[in-house]
Each structure stands twice: as structure tokens, then as C-alpha cells.
Image (cartoon, coloured by chain):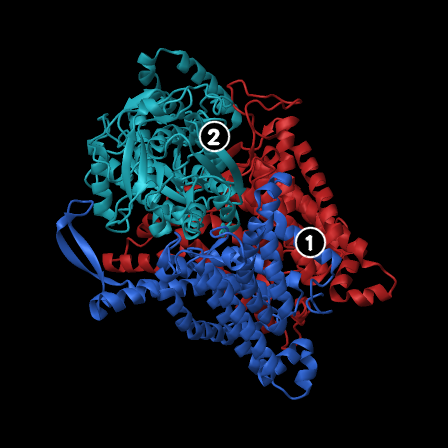
Chain colours: A blue, B cyan, C red
Amino acid sequence: MESIILQLLNGLDKGSAYALIALGLTLIFGTLGVVNFAHGALFMMGAFIAVTLNMVFGISFEVEDPTRTDFLGNVMMVDTPYVVHWFGEGVGNFLIDWSVPMAVVIAIPIMALIGVVMERGLIRFFYKRPHADQILVTFGLAIVLQEIIKAFYGANPIPTPAPEAFVGSFDVGQLLGFDPFAIMYPYWRLVYFFFAALIIGLVFAFLQFTTFGMVVRAGMADRETVGLLGIDIDRRFVLMFALAAVVAGLAGVMYAPILSPNYHIGMDFLVLSFVVVVVGGMGSLPGAVAAGFLLGILQSFASMSWIIELIPGINQVVIYLVAIVILLTRPRGLMGRKGVMEE
Amino acid sequence: MSFSKVSRRGVMKTGAATGVALAAPTLFTSAVWADGHTGFTNAPGEGSVTLGFNVPQTGAYADEGADELRAYELAVQHLNGEGDGGMLNTFSERNLDGTGILGRRVEFVTGDTQTNSDAARASARSMIERDGAIMITGGSSSGVAVAVQGLCQDAGVIFMAGLTHANDTTGKDRRANGFRHFFNTEMTGRALAPILEGLYGNERKAYHLTADYNWGWSQERSIRAYTEGLGWETVNNVLTPVGAGDFSSYLTPVANSGADVLVLNHYGGDMVNSLTQAVQFGLRDLQANGLNFEIVVPLFSRLMAQGAGSAIANIHGSTNWHWSLSDEGSQAFTRSFGTAYGFPPSQAAHTCYVQTLLYADAVQRAGSFNPCAVVEALEGFEFDGLGNGPTLYRAEDHQCFKDVLVVRGKENPDNEYDLLEIVEVTPRDAVTYAVDHPDFVEGQLGTCNPGA
Amino acid sequence: MLGLTAKDARLYLIVLVMLIFAPFFLNPFPEGSGLAQFNAGYPDMMQRLVIFGLFAVGFNILFGLTGYLSFGHAAFLGAGSYAGVWMFKLLTMNVIPALIVSTIVAGLFSLLIGFISLRRSGIYFSILTLAFAQMCYSLAYSVLTPITGGETGLQLALDDPRVLGVTQTAEGNIPVPHLFGLPMNASTSLDIGAWSFTFSVGYYFAAVVFALAFYFTIRLFRSPFGLVLRAVKSNQGRLSYTGLNARPYTLAAFVISGMFAGLAGGLMVSMDPLAGAERMLWTASGEVVLMTILGGVGTLIGPILGAGAITYLEAIISTINSTVLHRWFDIFPEWLENLLVNIVYPFVGSGWHLTLGLVFMIVVIFLPGGIVEGGRKIYGLFSRKREEPGSMPPNAAAQPGPGE
């Protein structure tokens, strides 16, 4: 039982990452009709905002320490971060320690800006172009963004730790009435889950309860009629794109302590997020979220060792297998609407 | 206008000649090879000789590849008499004097393996076919090493493997034209087991997470064999997909499995992620069976340690070489590398540098670039002064036998390079295994192929 | 000629001439000169150009004609490669049986996957093919290692049975793939002045196979069958009103393009007998999609040009290192030399991906419809000068409509 609950937690955690990325992707895919292969790159940029802030706070000046020598036998240079120098040990180290949560705050405007620039500068010229052209241009963009990051940060993963306060595990089991220490789960992963739930809730509330959201939903359902009503749907697209970029970016920022970011982390998530979106059904936001959690949970359960022993290799293919089964039994995924991207 | 016929028929003729030459007593062979500067693939002209450096420049191992390339450039400088000479001054053989190889200036071409067998072979073929490379070296994974080694055998050039740790490279898939300086999983098992016994005792229960591909299996088999030899029990072995990223669903069952040691048979990004996440899941703070829970990473590398950050503290593993070694050769290499690039070299850089020197020296001793002459010069070659103590290139499988390092992640590293400390230098005799070891016995070297 | 219209015959002749004289015009720079870096006339490169051209041409039969975007075609290339190597291991090193079996295995494989995937259309179809291919890759890399060689790739061994051939050569090496005794890796070179041209048996064999396949493709494009496939793309609903069931036609197209991929895989292992699992990875499937789009979807020559461009960029740009750059720019004063090297360096060597990404973006932004469309535009510019303005044929016809 404990192991089932633990895998459920793992699945919810994985699922929240999938759901967040898929949510952004389906906003672009479902509303704007753009196949955005650069969406993974947006996730990656988010993760690197966390890395960068961590590095910025860590920018140091060097002081000679005559008591020690470095590997070449010269006098050792000891680094002291400027923030520690300026604000003192307490505040300085707090800033460095809390860089990831702070990156969330600065990621919102940065990612929104990146989204706007991408949409105005490139994507808007491709709304009426064939999907093939969209794939080519966004894939090209994804490679370029990735290579720029690689040029600055190298190819190795960069450790980006969560604040000290979130190190360690929370006794989930005791909360549910199990023995103490039976079900321990890292704080940061629980934070990630609740963070994802919050973002998903905010996006849904935004689309449900604002006029803007109403127009966008109407546009998703029937773009032509909305246009005939004299509403300039295209003008709202830029905001949608920015919103999608922010969601993807935040997913990346918060994921950095779980998975040390490297430059191709976005590509690793790209294929998966497309599968999630399509399994959820084209044009359906709840579908994308549901599919994200479903695939995350199934992937976790398929990794249990007795299941792998039963069906070797199942942990490698479970997502694709489930996708095939769902698409064959439900023609338009979990909650897809007829006629979206079906031709 | 001239037609030069290069065909398989030519290969067969030279092949026959080779057979005769091999039968001749060793004493005379240098003389036999010396007058043969033709009759093999890409015989170099009088002025220069081209080496092919095939390293990962894109993908997950790009940083390791970049470090390998730095080492190669350094080796070429030293061979050509530029720079401070590095290990040329500490090498037990004194045949290399900074005048290139056999008086020819060393030039090089580079390519990208992408850590992908197909791309690596394509890149190696372009070096051989277009650039006339006489030797191919480099790489950062066993799959690529085995694939390129097979290609070099067929094309008739020498392959000096870079970083490759699976047994197969000099076991099941060994080839006469290929040589490996790096150690392998069998040696890791032999070196690590006694240390683990000393640290953690004989009554341990181990849980293995293993990357689901050739190297992972090889590593798991070796570590399991030697730890079970100590009396440890293997509770479980779970195969994880390569590049899984999130290992949570593999790590959570560990705590309640009854195991008290976790062995991570992972390398590269997988190792960085699985180790950091294992620490995040609190495995280090656990008590199991009345013992402190421990994590072991059989193959350690400084570049990976950098990615794992503070998670490496007090984790034990093995490594081929480390810049903090105090012998003359290691010091000389670290000094020239550090002076040139501003940071210490990685183990990948070291093995690549050494391989280049060993090749150059072998050519010099053989008096010919003919691959078969080089093979003969390297087989059974004993040397010292290149950083791992007295070393033997065993003739039967083209594997180097030398000291292996057991290292531990530092708790409070001074800087981002000073991450590992050496716990033990396991002597060569302790890691030497028999030629007919069951994990290796399947392979055949075949005969050397000089191409056409 | 050969049942082709004059226009198609001209195109076919151009392709034939390109194939025959490729060793010459792929090696335009003299040996040893700084620009020799850009020479692509060595056997491995020429073989890859032809093989990826074949792969892309086959892919275009499905994507270009029916509009069905498969994201899993690399699985068929991989299946063909494995089948080919197994023929080398078990039967003989002759390439003919290997090619036949590669094509058949890939055909059966694509029949199975196509039959299932074609129950859905649009993006749902794409994801189904992607899922199948990713499953093939993951399993080939790990669980199926006894059949596929796993990470290392499936390669020949000294103790393979090869019942109709020899297990080892007289010298104790693995025999090479051959065509009735003519080894694939044999080559002859011709030196004219500073130039050196290499004629490789493997390349010309691949070129003959390609020429046959391309002829078949042209006939298919112009056949009634091809017409039905185009109808599937332009309006499947309307097609079904005519009482025609489109699925058998699309399935046939899927299988044919899968067989092309298998043939390409078989050729690949005939040139270099090793099959790696990465061949089936989604990036490999994506690459053939990009090749086709880059060249021009639905055109005959487009996929060839796209395949050529990507293969060339990958192989050539990645081998340019700082030493080569310094050699190019050493005629300039040192500060300028270093400046130029620093400007160019991020785009070459380990930065070749950056160049590739930029090329994708530039082509699709400035040449909608790919290289072919771009060529047509340039041609249009020139011919407009001679002809009356406005008499130019509208080239919008080649542009697939949105929502395809």
C-alpha cells in the first residue's frame, strides 16, 4: 500500500510537469492553430532563468588566501559573492539560497516578453501558413535558442538547488494514518505539485471568468463566427502566446531543483508534451491537464520493479502504448473536439 | 592524369605480406616495416601526418568532448615541439622528441560523434576517406567506441579509444586495430569491492539501479559479482531507461526494500539526476537494518560530479585518473593543461592525451605508420610515466592494465574542480583479470588490417 | 521517353546527370587548398546524399501526395537496416538479398503500423506513428538487444554463419558487403592537376538503385493512383462522396513509402554494415520531415535537395574547427584574423546545430514552399524580363493550403 501511494505521489509530481507544459502547448495549438516545436525551448528558458539568477547572486570577487594553494601551486583565490559582501552574510546567503523561488517572480515578465517577441516577430507570420512551415520554423527556432544557451552555459547539467528550508522530506504517511517514516516525500516535490495546481487553477479561472477568456474560448470553438462578430481575435493571440510562454517558463523554473537543467532539457520534454496534448484531445485544456496527470501516474506505476519483471521494457514504452490505446478507442483523445487538426 | 587503383584486391595482397611479416621474429620487424611506407590505408606523405579526433561536440557529452579536444590539441602541440612538452618529459620511452611523428609534422581533423553510432561512423569515415586520417581516436561512450572500432578495423586504420568503460570494447567486440587505455567495469568491480568492504562491512544488502543499455548491464554484472563475493546480498536490480530524467519512481521503492546500499550504475546526465534525486529523497539520512544507508556510484567523473553539486559528498566510486595524483606524469600533464586552459583536465582528457602519445610512440618505435606495425609495437608494451604507474598494453585483448583510483566526493570542495579526493590507488595486479575471464572470453581480435 | 512527359523526362535526365557526375562537381576545390574543407566528393558523403535522398523521396510519396504527416518513418529505415545486417550475418555478404529482405521487412512493418495508424487522421495520425516509432526505438535500445545490438548497434562478427558466403576472409577479417564479388568499399581515384576525384563502387551502386526508385516515383506521381492520393490531400470528404474508399489508397502509399525507407536502410548497411538504434529515434523521423519541407513538399525534386542540404551541412560544417578557420583567415592581419575566427567559430564545429537551425528559419521565412519554390521564384524573376509581365504562370498552385 505504501508503495502504491508513493508511486501515486511520483505520478502526480511527474504529471504536474507534463500538465503544465501541455497546458501552454495546447493554448498555442488549440487557440492559435500553430504547431509550436519551440515550446520545449520555452520550458528550457524558464529553467535557465532559475540557473541565471542563481549564478547572478553567486557572482563573486576573488581574494587571495595565502594559506592555501590551487592545483597549479599558485596562491589560492577564494570567492566571495558580492551579495554577501554588500548585504552581509545573512541577507546575502538568503538571496543565494532562495534564488529559485525568486526566479519565479522575475520569470513572469521575462517569459511574457519572450512570448510577445516570438509571436510578434515570427509566429504571427505563420498563422495562415501550412503546418509543415510552422514545424520547420519553430524547430529551427528551438535549435537556435538551445544553441545560444549551450554557448553560454555549456552542455553539462547545472545544479540549481532549492532553498535549504525545502531540503528533506515530509511525512505524508503520518498525515494519512500510516506509521511514521513509511511514506516520506521531498518538500520541494510537494511544493511543485501545489504550485502546478495553482497555476492550472489560475489559467482556468482566467479563461472562465474574464471577458478576454470568454472571447478566446469562443475563438477556440469557432474562430470564423467570432471574427464575423467584429471581434479582432488576432489581437488577443499575442496575449495568449505570452500566457503560454509564462506557463511553460514557470514550469521550467520550478523544475530546475528536481532536474539539473541542461541545454536540451526542452527537447527531452517536447515529444512527450505533444503526446500529452494529443492524448488529451486537440483544443481541450482540461483534456491536456487530465492526460498529463494520467500519463505521469501510469509512467510511475509502470516503473515498479515487479511490473518491469512481468513485462520487460514496459517502463520505456508505457506512455506511447497508452497513447496508442487511447487514440484507437477514443478517436479524438480524451476530450478533443471534432474537426480540430484532423485534416 | 593518373589513375591510382585502390581496391579490395590490393588489400588481400598486402594482407598476405602481413602474414609473412608477423611470422618473422620480433627482433627484425622494425627493419621489415621501416622500408614500407606504402601498402596501407592513408599512408602519410613526407611532410605531415593527419590524425582524426572524433569526439562528441553536441548532445549530453559535449562538455566531455570539448575537454577531450583540448587534450588532443595539447598532445599535438607537444608532439610538434610546441609548449612545455607535458608528459613527453616523463614518459618512460624517450622516442618522442618534439619533431612530430617519424619526422612528420602532426596535423589533425575533428568531427562530431553526437554520441550516436551512426553519426560517429559517418564522421570517422569522412576523416579517413576525405582527410586521409591515419588514426582515429576519441569518443565518450562505449557504443560509439565499439562502432568506430569496427569501422577502423574494416578501413585499415588504428583506433585509439577515448572514454569507454564497458567490458565489450576489449571483450566481446575487441578488434585487432583497436586499443583501449581507459579501464573497464571489471576493473571497477575489483578496485571498488575491497574499499566498500572496509567502509561498509560484509553484511550489506544492495539495491541496483542500472541504465538499460550495454554499459549499464556490464557495470551491474561486475559490481554485483564482486560485492556478492564480499558476502553482500543483492536485493534488487531495476533497469532504468536512458535519459529518464526523473528517477523518482525508481528511487521511492528503495527505502522500503530492506536494502541498505544503493548502487547507481549510471553515467552522465543519468548519474547526475539519479544521484541528486536520491539525496533529495533523503536516502542518505536513512537508517536501514541498523546501518547508515549508503550510495555508491561505480564510475565517477569530475564533470559529472560538477553537475551533481553537493550531492556527491562522501559518495564513493572509481575513476581512471584524477589531476590531484602526485606522480610526475600526472603533475606534468595537469600543469601544461592548466596553464593552457585555466582549469585542471578531466579523466577523459587524460586518457585521450595518453592515447595520442602512445600511438605516436608506437609508430616511432615501429618505424612505420603501417597499422600492423603499430599493432605489433603496442601489443605487450610496458611503459610508465603517463600518470597511472607502470602500465601494460596486453597483447591478447589490447586493454591497458594499470592502477585504478577509488575516489570519494569531497564534503567542502575548495572550488568547482576540486570535487573528488583519492581514497585508494588500487595497484595493477589487483585489477588484472585473466584473458579467459567469462565476461571477455567471447571476443576475437582477428588479425590486423592495414587496408589498402 | 520511357513513358514520361517531356518535362518529367528532362527532370529525370538532369537527376541522372547529377548522379553520374556527382564525384566531379561535389569536389570543386583542389586538394590541399583551404576550401577543400567544403568538398563533399568522398564516398561516405556521396552515399549518404543518395540514401537520404531516397528516404526523403519515399517519405514525400506519403506526405507530399496524401498530406498524411508521419512522424515515425525512421522506424522503417531502422527495421530495414536491421534486416539487412541480419542477412549479412546469416546468409551472404552479397547486397542484393539484403536489399530485398530490407525492403520486404520494412514493407510488412509499415503495413502493420499503417493499418493501425491510418484509422485516424491529422495530428492524431502523426502522434500514432510517432508513438510506434518511439516504442521501436526504446525497445531496440534496451530489451531487444539480442536482436538489435542495443546501444552499440547490430554489427557483423567474425563467427557469423553466413551460410552462402564465408565466415571470415583468408586473413581472418570480416568480409565486406559486395555485389557478386564487387566490393562496395572499392574505389578508384582520378587525379587531374591538383584535383582528385574518387569513384566509389558503393556510391554508383546506390545511385543506380536511386535512379530506379526515382523513375518509379515519377511514374507514381503521374499515375491515376497518384491522382487519387492528391485527392485525399485536397479533400478527403469529397473523395468519399464519389464512392471511393480512400483508406486502401493511403495505406498503399504508406507501405510504398515505408518500403522506400527500408530500401534506404538496406543501402545504408550495404555501405557500412552497422545498424544503430538511434536510426529510429524521433529526431531521425523529424529529420526526414525537415528534409522534405526544406526542399519542397509534394514536388519531385524537392526532397532530394532538402536531403542533400541537411546531410551536407551536418557532415561538413561540423568538421570545421578553429585550426581550419585560422588557416582560412591567415592572409589577414592577426587582429582581423582573430576577429573573423571569433565571429565565424560559433557557427561551425560544435556549433553546427546553430547553423542548421538558422538555415531552417531563413528558408521557411524567405522561401515559403522550400528550396524548390525559392528556385522557381528566382527563375520567375529572370523569365519575367523576357516575357510580358503577368504572363508568368501563377506558382501559388504548389502552395498547400492552410490546415493541411
- Find disc 1 in the rendering and name its residue: A324
Q: Is residue B69 above or below residue C92?
A: below
Q: Report the number of discs.
A: 2
Q: Judge the density around disc 1: few (<14), some (14-19), many (≥20) Cα neighbours within 10 Å.
A: many
Which residue lies at the image location 19% right of the left edge and 55% below the top edge? A78
**SS class, disc 1:** helix
Q: Is residue B4 above or below residue C404?
A: above
Q: Judge the density around disc 2: few (<14), some (14-19), many (≥20) Cα neighbours within 10 Å.
A: many
Give the residue type at disc 2: Asp
Query: Which residue is farthest bottom?
Result: A230
- The percent position of residue C362, horizontal first and vertical second, equals 50, 65
- Find disc 2 in the rendering and name its residue: B168
Give me the chain letter of mark 2.
B
- The percent position of residue B317, horizontal first and vertical second, equals 36, 38
Q: Is residue C384 left or right of residue C195?
A: right
Confirm whether residue C216 shows in the render.
Answer: no
Query: Which residue is farthest right?
Result: C243
- The percent position of residue A198, horizontal first and vertical second, equals 52, 71
Task: Give the quadrant of the N terminus of chain B.
Answer: top left
- The percent position of residue A174, horizontal first and vertical second, equals 50, 57
